[in-house]
Image (tube, helix red, strand yellow):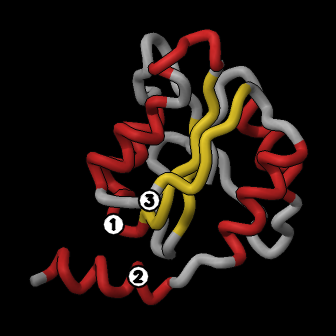
Amino acid sequence: MFDSKTGNVRRFFHKLGLTENKGIELKTGLKVYEPYILLTYTTGMGQVPQTTLDFLKSNHINLYAVVASGNKNWGQNFALSANKISNMYGVPILHKFEMSGMPEDVEIVRERVRNISYETHRIKQRSDTA
């Protein structure tokens, strides 16, 4: 799943080449029933985009991890949306990258996605229903 305003996150997603998951760009009313990783951007002074917040309201239960883009010119607010989403939903931050990412950012995210254990997601779901 990805949310992109200027195209940076879309370009990064396509660089990942994760063909087994075609990737879906966030749209109003979209429902997700499987575990997913969210790629999003940071807006304003370190804010989560409203489109991302709206999507997460009804789809956070299957959120597994977050990746965010930003601009390092914003200093401590760089890719801060990842921190906010992580805190809101108790999910790990897989990575933060600048603009549309460098080749090393792509490799880091690919490696971290490959190493994800979905057992952790099942434990999270059980604790949500307890």
Q: Residue at x 59, y 77 (%)?
A: 116
Q: Quadrant of residue 24?
A: bottom right
Q: Quadrant of the N terminus?
A: bottom right
Q: Secondary structure at mark 1?
A: helix
Q: Three-letter amino acid code at disc 1?
A: Ile
Q: Quadrant of residue 7?
A: top right
C-alpha gap between disc 3 and disc 2:
11 Å
Q: Nearer the viewer, residue 92 or 1?
A: 92
Q: Residue at x 88, y 49 (%)?
A: 15
Q: Which residue is mark 2?
A: 120
Q: Three-letter amino acid code at disc 3?
A: Pro
- Residue 69 locus on image (x, y percent): 63, 33
Say if mark 3 contacts mark 2, CB within 8 Å: no
Residue 78 relative to residue 21: left or right: left
Q: Which residue is mark 1?
A: 61
C-alpha gap between disc 1 and disc 2:
13 Å
Q: Residue at x 32, y 54 (%)?
A: 58
Residue 124 relative to residue 11: left or right: left
Of tags 1 and 3, the one toward the viewer is 3
Of tags 1 and 2, the one toward the viewer is 2
Q: Which residue is mark 3?
A: 92
Residue 99 relative to residue 82: left or right: right
Residue 106, visible in the rendered structure = yes
- Residue 67 locus on image (x, y percent): 58, 48
- Residue 71 locus on image (x, y percent): 65, 19
Q: Secondary structure at mark 2?
A: helix
